[in-house]
Image (cartoon, rainbow, N blue to C red):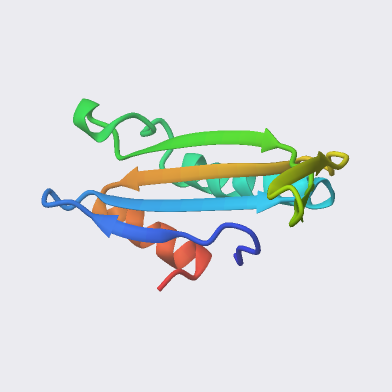
Amino acid sequence: MTLDYLDFDYSEDADGTGTFDAMASVQPAQLVHLQAEVARVLAWAHAGFPGECQPLEDGGTWHYDLRGSQETSAPLALEFDAETSRLSATPGFAGAPRTTVCLTLSGSADFCAGFREAFGLD
């Protein structure tokens, strides 16, 4: 399975727990595709390791953290008046909101190996 929006970084702690972190930020037209990709990743994890989604310190094999935010930005026209030595700012209209999704997956060595294989992560 290929990933088009989520680009995971991997780290591992001293106990061998692996962590995959990804963040993606999209315009409204891509949001449905990003949501589907996140759902595909989590569905794979739940299907491959059923009933094992809980913090590793509580006996789980894998766990995840999923967060999102939506924000708009508006351009700000800045002009400097050399005669008065003042700066003026004129706000523009807000554009379409961007949605940012952050997904962190942590797991055992077996989970991490399976995740790498399933999604072609090296």
Residue 82, image x, y percentages = 74, 57
Q: Residue at x 76, y 46 (%)?
A: 31
Image quarter for residue 104? Answer: top left
Residue 21, image x, y percentages = 42, 51
Image quarter where the C terminus lies is bottom left
Q: Residue at x 49, y 44 (%)?
A: 103
Q: Residue at x 84, y 44 (%)?
A: 95
As rendered, which of 118 and 99 lies closer to the eye?
A: 99
Image quarter where the N terminus lies is bottom right
Residue 94, image x, y percentages = 83, 39
Q: Residue at x 61, y 67 (%)?
A: 2
Q: Is residue 82 above or below residue 98?
A: below
Residue sticking out furthest to the bottom: 122
Is 48 displayed left or right of 55 in the figure? right
Is 51 displayed left or right of 87 in the figure? left
As rendered, which of 25 and 58 lies closer to the eye?
A: 25
Is 27 displayed left or right of 121 in the figure? right
As rendered, which of 60 and 48 lies closer to the eye?
A: 60
Residue 85, image x, y percentages = 68, 50
Is 11 displayed left or right of 70 in the figure? left
Q: Is residue 21 above or below residue 102?
A: below
Residue sticking out furthest to the top: 58
